[in-house]
Amino acid sequence: MKLAVVGGGSTYTPELIDGFARLRETLPITELVLVDPAADRLDLVGGLARRIFARQGHGGTIVTTSDLDAGVEGADAVLLQLRVGGQAARERDETWPLECGCVGQETTGAGGLAKALRTVPVVLDIAERVRRTNPDAWIIDFTNPVGIVTRALLQAGHKAVGLCNVAIGFQRKFAALLGVSPAEVHLDHVGLNHLTWETGVRLGGPEGENLLPRLLAEHGDAVAGDLRLPRSVVDRLGVVPSYYLRYFYAHDAVVEELRTKPSRAAEVAAMEKELLEMYGDPALDEKPGLLAKRGGAFYSEAAVDLAASLLSGTGKGSAGPSAGGTGGGRAGGSPYQVVNTANNGTLPFLPDDAVIEVQAAVGPNGAVPLPVAPVDPLYAGLIAHVTAYEDLALEAALRGGRDRVFKALLAHPLVGQFDRADGLTDRLIAHNREHLEWA
């Protein structure tokens, strides 16, 4: 089995490598190719990756290359983890929206739109090149904004599934609080990428007992603390929102907070410098503890399960050849996985081609969402609103033009005012001109 990781020079990559090494029976990789144009970073990450494989006794070969076509040729799956423009572009995404009184964040709001505009054309070009060399390869997208990028891939006819680590992080946290193994915890997870709510926490599968009321009663302070929301808000909602909902539920407070502290991009850039120095140490043969602060916790485990289910039906999310139900998985594992995939009627208030983030049965034919209980209007309204924005954002990413950018910004619930949308449009284009062919 050959896998390629585009963006393999990322400081995230050792987290992924560690998962591939530990879970080699679930995903038996014979060749792993790390593809990245940044040769210096790639050498450091590739060296550590080989040492991690050797330490853990993995017999697979790790290849590094800056040649995309050679790297993806013959791959069974291609994992995308890109950051077009690097941390410098992220720094800008987190800064200029604040000038207009809006949240500066790399995956939502105006900064998220900027990232989508830079990213979608690049990802679609990569996907077309993958399709030319191996039309049967699966594309697993971890590149933000995952929902918009995955929708672009599916709309262009690619075999693609989007992946985020938010759900698996909640699963691990809830399992620890409840004193059970993560494999026992099934989340009723609903929404869009970075706009989700846990409406149920069940033991043993979708029909299991819902322990969310008990979880909130006994551990509400810990849950609210992780979300950086008041306990009273979580109690009144009766569900657990993604921590990204803080940008919506406490927008003005977050804007003031962001104006008074260094950007997350600056923090990550400093962390990456330190990590790369560590990766260059020939004695290091495991992922360093600092990597946990970089983000992407449990990303490797989610990626292994998804790839295994798509390629051979052996991951925890496997539904077998029909992608219809309950098969597969390691002993005690759930047959389902939270992914980003086409709605296809799952949420009746959204178009079929919208990309939603829900529990799905995953197999060689793709991801089939599980039925979702009727969504409370409090959440359904925001989901529909952001989906409309994503429609316009994708149109702007594919076709360009100031007017399309402006309409997408005006439609976003974190913007929504004419003068703000105008000011943000001018700033977005000015800060991203080098990445926008039409600008």
Image (cartoon, grey):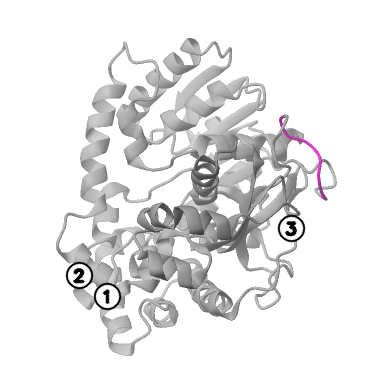
Label 3 neighbourhood size at 10 Å, few (<14), some (14-19), many (20+)? some
Front-most of residues 73 and 241: 241
Label 2 neighbourhood size at 10 Å, few (<14), some (14-19), many (20+)? some
At label 1, which amino acid type do we have?
Answer: Asp
Residue designated by label 3: 370
Q: How many marks?
A: 3
- Mark sitting earlier along the chain (3/2): 2
Residue designated by label 1: 252
For the residues labelled 3 and 1, the Cα–Cα distance comes to 36 Å
What's the magenta region? 324-330
x, y percentage for residue 290?
A: 30, 32
Mainly helix, strand or loop, the magenta region? Answer: loop
Q: Is residue 339 left or right of residue 226?
A: right
At label 2, which amino acid type do we have?
Answer: Glu
Q: Which quadrant of the figure has residue 91?
A: bottom left
x, y percentage for residue 160?
A: 64, 50
> What residue is at 81 percent from the left and 40 percent from the top?
327
Q: Which mark is residue 256?
A: 2
Q: Is residue 399 left or right of residue 112?
A: right
Secondary element at image label 3? loop
Quadrant of the snapshot with the N terminus: top right
Quadrant of the snapshot with the C terminus: bottom left
x, y percentage for residue 348?
A: 71, 75
